[in-house]
Amino acid sequence: MSLETQAIEQLRPVAIEPGILVHPEGSCLFSMGRTRVICTATVEDKVPPFLLDTGRGWVTAEYGMLPRSTHTRQVRERTRGRPDSRALEISRLVGRCLRATMDLGSLGERTVTLDCDVLQADGGTRCCAINGAAVALCQALESLVGRGELKANPMHTLVAGLSVGLVRGEPVLDLDYEKDSQAEVDMNVVMTAGGGFVEIQGAAEKSPFDRGQLDLMLELARLGIGEIIRRQREALGL
């Protein structure tokens, strides 16, 4: 089996539903297998203090999991009384990845906030959040163009992420919870439509991996991400 065939066969069923909500400027329900994340894009005519009077905009994100998105109920942050460190780390990841797609100077002094809420988790929630947020962001910016507030969409590329790992020594793409729990290596790869890497997060869970295995995992991720971006384009009518 070629890596390209393997990448397509190992992707869980993908569903992308843009415009799922009425009120936000952009929204998307992104599903991969049993993992489902709803993403919204909110545009506001303001920027953080460090960007005041610069003419540049900002893109930021907030990620969270609904209490029964997992096997057992998760306590809400307001009940816990402190931020969830994992949610904060993923929020920053999503923000970084989406800012990499933008010409923030062309956005003007606006902030786009991407809210990513996990409805159901079965592995790969951070990658699904990135994938859905990219669709919601593009939709929101196109709405600004349609209203004449922007001359052109400042989002110059789509971006997507996928998990990849080694399970019983073999490279496996798009790990669900069961495969992730068995993986010797767990990695998240985020790339642009042009093939540029935005982020690579990877670690050996049991034993070290070598350069050859790393190259195989990255290539498998590249092929799978290409398919996700193709589906994003299709959902957006690009």
Image (spheres, helix red, strand yellow):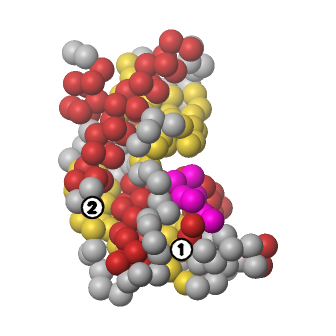
Which residue ends up furthest to the front in the rendered image?
A: 151
Q: Residues within 10 Å of mark 2 (few under 14, many from 20)?
A: some
Amino acid type assigned to the residue bearing label 2 in the image: Leu
Label 1 secondary element: strand
Please report the bounds of the magenta region as a residue range.
99-105
User: Where 2 sits versus 82, above or below?
Assistant: above
Residue at position x 75%, y 79% in the image: 52
Q: Is residue 141 visible?
A: yes
x and y percentages locating residue 136 in the rendered image: 38, 67
Q: Nearer the viewer, residue 211 or 199?
A: 199
Q: Is residue 62 left or right of residue 167?
A: right
Amino acid type assigned to the residue bearing label 1 in the image: Val
In contact (CB < 8 Å): disc 1 and disc 2: no
Residue at position x 41%, y 51% in the image: 158
Q: Nearer the viewer, residue 82 or 127?
A: 127
Q: Is residue 181 visible?
A: no
x and y percentages locating residue 75 in the rendered image: 52, 74
Residue at position x 29%, y 85% in the image: 22
User: Where 222 sits versus 20, above or below?
Assistant: above
Q: Which residue is mark 1?
A: 112
Q: Quadrant of residue 55?
A: bottom right
User: Where 82 sits versus 188, above or below?
Assistant: below
x and y percentages locating residue 48 in the rendered image: 71, 77
Which residue ends up furthest to the right in the rendered image?
A: 50
Residue at position x 35%, y 87% in the image: 23
Q: Earlier in the sequence, mark 1 or mark 2?
A: 1
Q: Which residue is mark 2?
A: 236
Q: Quadrant of the N terminus?
A: top left
Q: Nearer the viewer, residue 6 or 178?
A: 6
x and y percentages locating residue 195 in the rendered image: 45, 35
User: Residue 43 colored magenta?
Assistant: no
